[in-house]
Image (cartoon, rainbow, N blue to C red):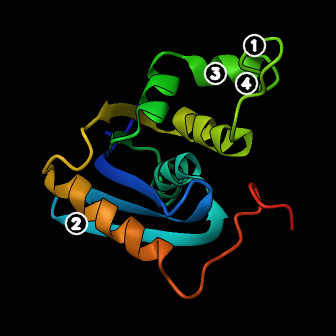
Amino acid sequence: MSQQAKSQVTLFTDGACSGNPGPGGYGTLLVHGPHRKELSGGFRRTTNNRMELLAVITGLESLKRSCRVTVYTDSNYIVQAVNKGWARKWRSLGWMRNKKDRAENPDLWERLLALCEIHEVAFQWVRGHAGHTENEYVDRIAVAASQSSDLAIDTGYERV
C-alpha cells in the first residue's frame, strides 16, 4: 500500500514574558510552500518556558494531518529536552527529573511529546535577537500577544 508523502512544514516559534512569572505570550509562524499561517495568544500570569512550549504545541496542533516539521526556536530548554531525550525520561519517571526534583510544565510536555508521536519533528535552535528574520517576527507577535488587553488564564500555571 502506497503512503502519501508527508507535507514538509517549517515552524518558527517564540515565547515572551514580562517578568518571569508575569504576563506572557507566544508567537508561531507556520510555513508550507507559499502558505504562511500566524498564531499567537497571551496569558495574564505564566512563565517564559511555558510560552516557548505553547508556541510549539499550538503550531503542531494546528496541522490537520501528520507532517514532517522542522521547528526553529531560540529555546534551548525545548531543543535540549527533546533532542537529548530528557522530556521522555521525565515522563518515564512520573514527571520527576531525578529522585527529588519534579519536572516543570508536565502538562505541556505531555502535549508536546504526544504531538511528536503524530508528526516527524526536528528541533533546531536559533540564537534569539540575532537578526534571524522569522525569529524576530515571532518574537514581535509573542510580545504583542503578552500585552493584549484580553489575556487568558494559563490554567496549567495559575490555580484558579
Q: Are discs 4 and 1 less than 8 Å apart at CB? A: no
Indicate the position of residue 11 as horizontal and vertical percent values. Answer: 33, 50
Q: Which residue is mark 3?
A: 88
**Identity of the residue furthest to the right in this view:** 160
Specify few, some or many for label 1: CA neighbours under 10 Å numbering under 14, 14-19, or 20 or more: few
Q: Distance between the Cα atoms at labels 1 and 3?
A: 13 Å
Q: Name the front one of labels 4 and 1.
A: 1
**Picture layout, residue 57 above or below residue 110:** below
Indicate the position of residue 53 as horizontal and vertical percent values. Answer: 53, 47
Q: Are discs 2 and 4 less than 8 Å apart at CB? A: no
SS category of the residue bearing label 1:
loop
Q: Distance between the Cα atoms at labels 2 and 4?
A: 35 Å
Q: Earlier in the sequence, mark 1 or mark 3?
A: 3
SS category of the residue bearing label 3:
helix
Q: Which residue is mark 4?
A: 91
**108 to the left or right of 137:** right
Q: Which mark is residue 2?
A: none
Name which residue type carries label 1.
Asn
Residue 29 visible in this rendered orientation of the protein:
yes
Name which residue type carries label 4.
Arg
Specify few, some or many for label 3: CA neighbours under 10 Å numbering under 14, 14-19, or 20 or more: some
Identify the residue at horizontal 31%, vertical 51% (top origin). Answer: 12
Name which residue type carries label 2.
His
Q: Distance between the Cα atoms at labels 4 and 1?
A: 11 Å
Q: Which mark is residue 98?
A: 1
Q: Distance between the Cα atoms at labels 2 and 1?
A: 43 Å
Q: Which mark is residue 35?
A: 2
When asked about the image quadrant of residue 156, the answer is: bottom right
**115 to the left or right of 13:** right
Q: Are discs 4 and 3 less than 8 Å apart at CB? A: yes
